[in-house]
Amino acid sequence: MNIRIESITEKNENEALQLETAEEQEGFVESVEECLAEARVWRQWKPVAIYDDTQMVGFAMYGYLLGRVWFDRLLIDQRFQGRGYGRKAVEALLLRIHKEYPQQSQIYLSVVEGNDQAAKLYQDFGFAFNGERDTKGEHVMIKMNCR
């Protein structure tokens, strides 16, 4: 597995728009289309594609918004789930976030209630629920001491 993260551009946007969650995961993360529309309005968001060599396997979005660094979205296409891509993607994305925001000691994310698998994955990387809810009612998690 050779995971790499690339910015979404005109060149790979159509491929990213084809990514989908499994049916039972609908509602856990916004569609790529919704994310890209949001990133066009809020330029602080950085949408990225997750590749294994040349194969796009997922999508994520992160950025600095409202005084916080957010690891905001993660979607592994249904065809590639169950192969360890989620874990490797989180690892690669955290490295990228640390490099782009070295002055930040905390990273935030949010999880939809019932998405226990995602919550467990994030907990494995040191995220913990902080008792907050975001503007959509999702449970906020924070990773401390990221420097």
Image (cartoon, rainbow, N blue to C red):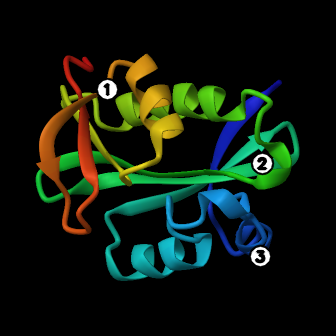
The answer for how far apart the CA atoms under marks 3 and 2 are is 13 Å
Q: Quadrant of the N terminus?
A: top right
Q: Tell me where residue 147 appears, x and y as whole percent.
A: 25, 17
Label 3 vs 2, first from the N-terminus:
3
Label 3 vs 1, first from the N-terminus:
3
Instruction: State if disc 2 and disc 1 touch (CB < 8 Å).
Output: no
Question: In terms of secondary structure, where does tag 2 sit?
Answer: strand
The answer for how far apart the CA atoms under marks 3 and 1 are is 32 Å
Q: Which residue is mark 1?
A: 127
Q: Is residue 133 above or below residue 118?
A: below
Q: Which residue is mark 3?
A: 14
Dot 2 alpha-carbon crowd within 10 angstroms: few under 14, some 14 to 19, many 20 or more: many
Q: Tell me where residue 136 appears, x and y as whole percent.
A: 26, 68
Residue under the point 77% across and 34% down: 82
Residue under the point 53% across and 36% down: 117
Q: Nearer the viewer, mark 3 or mark 1?
A: 1
Viewer-side residue, 20 vs 67 = 20
Q: Amino acid at mark 2?
A: Val
Q: Tell me where residue 122 appears, x and y as whole percent.
A: 43, 29
Q: Which mark is residue 5?
A: none
